[in-house]
Image (cartoon, coloured by chain):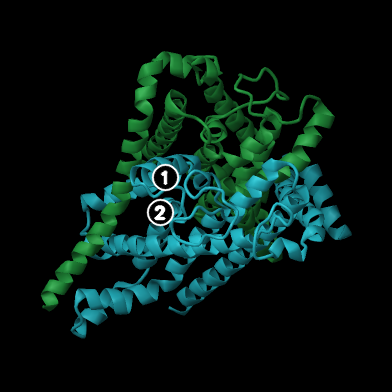
């Protein structure tokens, strides 16, 4: 340790600017780390004691402020949105990488629209959802409207990650498959997509993270009813919306802390999953 | 038969590829159709440059919100850009090997934390802090800027780090060979070479800050007046929509959609200038 300090002192004598730069870099990293830590530690310490069993009762009442119905709604909205966005996103990526020729105009246009879609703020998605799905198509404030809005939101994520994954599949795989007499379609489904699976998975996990954290796009599409959705057409709130709703009420500060802890845990779990997927992806690359 | 199936699936894939285009078109059509009539009724200059937002009196000027968005975003950049770029330099060139994996995971976690959680943290920690240290009500431009500065960090760090790592090693080695220290080589040779990627990260950070809604709403105070100081409350374009959309009707509702049109146009301008910049850089 003292060896290191000596080194730093001698660096400071020789070249004060270098020492300052090094200090600035470490300081910035420390500030970043500390701010993340303070969010996590503060919320966990304040919230963990309030994680009581009644917060997970099967039905929401104004007394128990149960988050279980919202949690279940979150799972449903996530699954349904993936169900909508995955086939479309993967299909689009397959067309763009496997079918469209080099220099195809459509490739450039979809790349631009995907970029535009990923830059649109979630409140604008929410407003669009309420104008189009809720009012114009008459779906009302419902699980379905929320799902469709979120599907458009995560579509660029799925498209991009699938495209990247498909591009990294070596051409020799395709040539081998064609050489054995397989058609284009068979090659895509049996050879190319399976080898791209880990990359697609990482896009899916990113999408899940985005859905779980979303609130602004859902308030005006899926609504804020705190009960479990009984059908696609009933209004229902996800856990993030639930947390927003009880935090703006002001009476449920303890429950808000507890809900924040659960959300943090969820996000951590999703991130751990994504890391595991990335590891697998990296590992396979090294093997090849 | 086989031929038919191949052609059919090709069509299906093509249709899927067109859905993202259709989505952008639909979003444009519905936003503009919903918002433009109000802008025409109010008058473009009264709408964009009107200082008063009083829906009950028929006054729909969104200048305070436009200025609010600009202030809040600038505040976020003042905090987020230096911290983010320096942290990216740390991750790419200064981080001890053992620390790298946890640091990477921490940045990913920062990106994943829902904005309501950030907003709530801001409400229970930053707002009282601002109130005690600087006075005022606490829900302020300052609180919103600090919180957004924190929220844009992961965007800036990840993209800048990738840009710094993409600089050929020879730049760094060349600087070292000329006798520069590690720090000078990184800051004088590598970072300038990565500037286009770093710039991209800042622009995407701006997009994130301009578009953030819930977290800002919880800490900004939301008065539709141009703030005269850091401790004054502020309302942004995004929060204007989410605050009043729940109960607005008629012209008021259309004016809110008009707010979204302005927001959408702002984001489009940012994105298009970024892609123009990228094309020129290439």
Who comes first in sequence, dot 1 or dot 2? Answer: 1
Q: Quadrant of the C terminus of chain A?
A: bottom left
The one of A235 and A247 positioned closer to us in this rendering: A235
Q: Is disc 2 surrounded by few (<14), some (14 to 19) or many (20+) residues within 10 Å?
A: many
The dot on residue A129 is 1
Percent of width and height locating residue A99? 22, 64
Query: Which chain gets the cyan colouring?
Result: A
Q: Quadrant of the N terminus of chain A?
A: bottom right
Is residue B235 rendered to the left or right of residue B133?
left
Is residue A287 rendered to the left or right of residue B18?
right
- Which residue is rendered at x = 46% and y = 52% of the image? A142
Query: Which chain gets the green colouring?
Result: B
Marks 1/2 in contact by CB < 8 Å: the verdict is yes
Q: Residue B265 appears in which quarter of the rendering?
A: top left
The dot on residue A88 is none
The residue pinned by badge 2 equals A148
- Which residue is rendered at x = 53% and y = 41% of the image? B208
Is residue A256 rendered to the left or right of residue B163?
right
Are both tags, 1 and 2, on one chain? Answer: yes
Q: How many marks?
A: 2
Q: In this picture, is A273 found above or below A60?
A: below
Secondary structure at badge 1 equals helix
Percent of width and height locating residue A193? 34, 73
Q: In this picture, is A259 found above or below B82?
A: below
């Amino acid at each position: 340790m003292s060896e290191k300090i000596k080194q730093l002192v001698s660096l400071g004598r020789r070249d004060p600017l270098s020492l300052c730069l090094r200090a600035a870099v470490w300081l910035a990293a420390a500030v970043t780390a500390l701010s993340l830590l303070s969010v996590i530690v503060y919320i966990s310490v304040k919230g963990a004691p309030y994680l009581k069993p009644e917060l997970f009762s099967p039905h929401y009442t104004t007394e128990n402020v149960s988050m279980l119905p919202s949690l279940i709604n979150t799972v449903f909205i996530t699954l349904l949105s993936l169900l909508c966005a995955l086939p479309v996103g993967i299909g689009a990526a397959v067309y763009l990488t496997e079918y469209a020729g080099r220099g195809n105009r459509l490739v450039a246009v979809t790349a631009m629209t995907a970029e535009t879609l990923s830059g649109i703020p979630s409140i604008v998605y929410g407003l669009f959802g309420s104008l189009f799905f809720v009012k114009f198509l008459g779906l009302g404030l419902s699980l379905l409207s929320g799902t469709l809005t979120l599907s458009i939101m995560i579509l660029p994520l799925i498209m991009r990650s699938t495209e990247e994954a498909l591009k990294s599949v070596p051409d020799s795989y395709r040539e081998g498959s064609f050489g054995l007499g397989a058609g284009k379609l068979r090659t895509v489904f049996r050879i190319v997509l399976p080898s791209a699976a880990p990359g697609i998975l990482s896009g899916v996990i990113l999408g899940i993270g985005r859905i779980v954290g979303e609130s602004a796009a859902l308030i005006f599409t899926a609504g804020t009813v705190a009960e479990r959705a009984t059908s696609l057409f009933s209004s229902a709130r996800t856990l993030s919306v639930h947390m927003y709703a009880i935090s703006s009420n002001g009476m449920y500060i303890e429950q808000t802390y507890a809900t924040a802890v659960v959300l943090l845990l969820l996000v951590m779990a999703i991130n751990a999953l994504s890391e595991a997927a990335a590891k697998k992806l990296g590992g396979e690359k090294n093997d090849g | 038969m086989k031929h038919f199936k191949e052609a059919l699936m090709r069509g299906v894939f093509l249709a899927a590829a067109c859905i993202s285009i259709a989505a952008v078109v639909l979003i444009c059509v519905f936003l503009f159709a919903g918002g433009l009539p109000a802008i025409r009724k109010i008058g473009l200059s009264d709408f964009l440059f009107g200082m008063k937002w009083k829906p009950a009196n028929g006054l729909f000027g969104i200048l305070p919100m436009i200025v609010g968005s600009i202030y809040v975003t600038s505040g976020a950049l003042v905090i987020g850009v230096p911290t983010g770029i320096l942290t990216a330099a740390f991750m790419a060139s200064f981080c001890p090997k053992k620390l790298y994996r946890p640091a990477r995971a921490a940045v990913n976690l920062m990106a994943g934390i829902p904005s309501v959680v950030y907003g709530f943290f801001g409400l229970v920690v930053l707002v009282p802090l601002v109130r005690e240290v600087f006075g005022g009500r606490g829900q302020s431009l300052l609180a919103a800027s600090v919180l957004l500065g924190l929220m844009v960090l992961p965007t800036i760090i990840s993209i800048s780090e990738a840009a710094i790592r993409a600089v050929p090693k020879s730049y760094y080695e060349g600087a070292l060979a000329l006798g520069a220290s590690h720090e000078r080589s990184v800051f004088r040779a590598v970072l300038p070479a990565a500037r286009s990627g770093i710039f991209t990260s800042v622009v995407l950070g701006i997009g994130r800050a301009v578009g953030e809604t819930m977290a800002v709403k919880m800490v900004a105070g939301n008065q539709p007046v141009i703030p005269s100081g850091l401790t004054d409350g502020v309302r942004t374009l995004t929060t204007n929509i989410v605050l009043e959309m729940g109960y607005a009707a008629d012209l008021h509702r259309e004016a809110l959609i008009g707010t979204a049109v302005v927001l959408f146009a702002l984001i489009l301008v940012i994105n298009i200038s970024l892609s123009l910049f990228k094309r020129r850089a290439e």
